[in-house]
């Protein structure tokens, strides 16, 4: 499966419009821990390794659009599959094995997430708490079966968003906003590499 998403900072008025007529899917707490090397080997390549509620996942970029990396990712879940991607043999626990390659935790956060469905689109509202930083962001998301459907899904998200009165700006996600506010050296490196567009 491939995740295609666009992030938005929404007003209360926009939020009400978005959820009008939408099906409420539920609310949950997400606890994330993100990993990288000291010199940001993963994130400088727009690769995001995390442990989400106890399960390891990695988000791999699908393409680059010339203005930073697009919000199109392949999500790979599970320690065995991630070991294959990085060619990490099982010696000890997954956490210990990735640490031996220099992957350490660079942030933790807890997110209160509310999800809705409107037509075929998933609408997500996140309230993230990093302990010393809080941030709210929304997403419009489509999951597609194969890479050939990604461009069409992107266009559909933009059209849906426009009809909902949202402005298609280059909004950053909660992780990037945290790095901007609290880890400027890491943030600057991402900007210089073109992963993040200011």
Image (cartoon, rainbow, N blue to C red):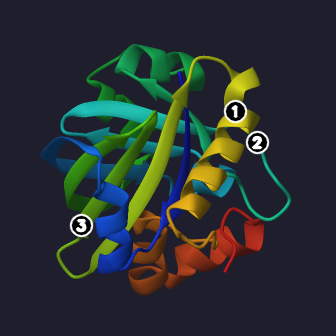
| Residue 2 tag number | none
| Residue 127 tag number | 3
**Cβ–Cβ under 8 Å for marks 1 and 2:** yes
Residue 91 place in picture, x, y as percent: 35, 17
Callout in the foreground (3, 2): 3
Residue 39 visible in the current orientation? no
- Whole-Å distance between the Cαs marked 3 and 2? 28 Å
* Number of residues whose C-alpha sits closer than 10 Å to that of mark 3, classed few (under 14), some (14–19) or many (20 or more): some
* Number of residues whose C-alpha sits closer than 10 Å to that of mark 1, classed few (under 14), some (14–19) or many (20 or more): many
Q: Earlier in the sequence, mark 1 or mark 2?
A: 2
- Whole-Å distance between the Cαs marked 1 and 3? 27 Å
Q: Earlier in the sequence, mark 1 or mark 3?
A: 3
Task: Give the residue number, with chain letter if any, for mark 1.
Answer: 150
Q: Earlier in the sequence, mark 3 or mark 2?
A: 2
> With 141 as the anchor, is 123 left or right in this view?
left
Task: Give the residue number, with chain letter if any, for mark 2.
Answer: 63
Q: Is residue 92 above or below residue 68?
A: above
Residue 111 place in picture, x, y as percent: 21, 58
Helix or strand or loop: what does disc 1 sit on? helix
């Amino acid at each position: 499966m491939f995740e295609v998403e666009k992030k938005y900072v929404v007003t209360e008025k926009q939020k009400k419009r978005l959820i009008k007529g939408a099906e409420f899917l539920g609310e949950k707490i997400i606890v994330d821990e993100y990993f990288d090397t000291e010199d940001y080997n993963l994130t400088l390549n727009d690769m995001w390794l995390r442990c989400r509620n106890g399960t390891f996942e990695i988000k791999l970029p699908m393409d680059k659009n010339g203005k930073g990396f697009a919000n199109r990712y392949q999500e790979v879940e599970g320690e065995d599959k991630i070991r294959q991607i990085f060619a990490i043999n099982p010696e000890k626990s997954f956490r210990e094995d990735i640490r031996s390659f220099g992957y350490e935790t660079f942030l933790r956060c807890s997110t209160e997430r509310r999800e809705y469905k409107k037509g075929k689109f998933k609408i997500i509202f996140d309230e993230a708490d990093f302990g010393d930083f809080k941030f709210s962001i929304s997403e419009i998301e489509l999951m597609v079966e194969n890479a050939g459907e990604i461009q069409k899904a992107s266009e559909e998200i933009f059209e849906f968003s426009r009809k909902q009165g949202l402005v298609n700006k280059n909004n950053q996600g909660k992780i990037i906003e945290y790095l901007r506010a609290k880890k400027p050296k890491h943030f600057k490196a991402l900007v210089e590499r073109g992963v993040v567009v200011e």
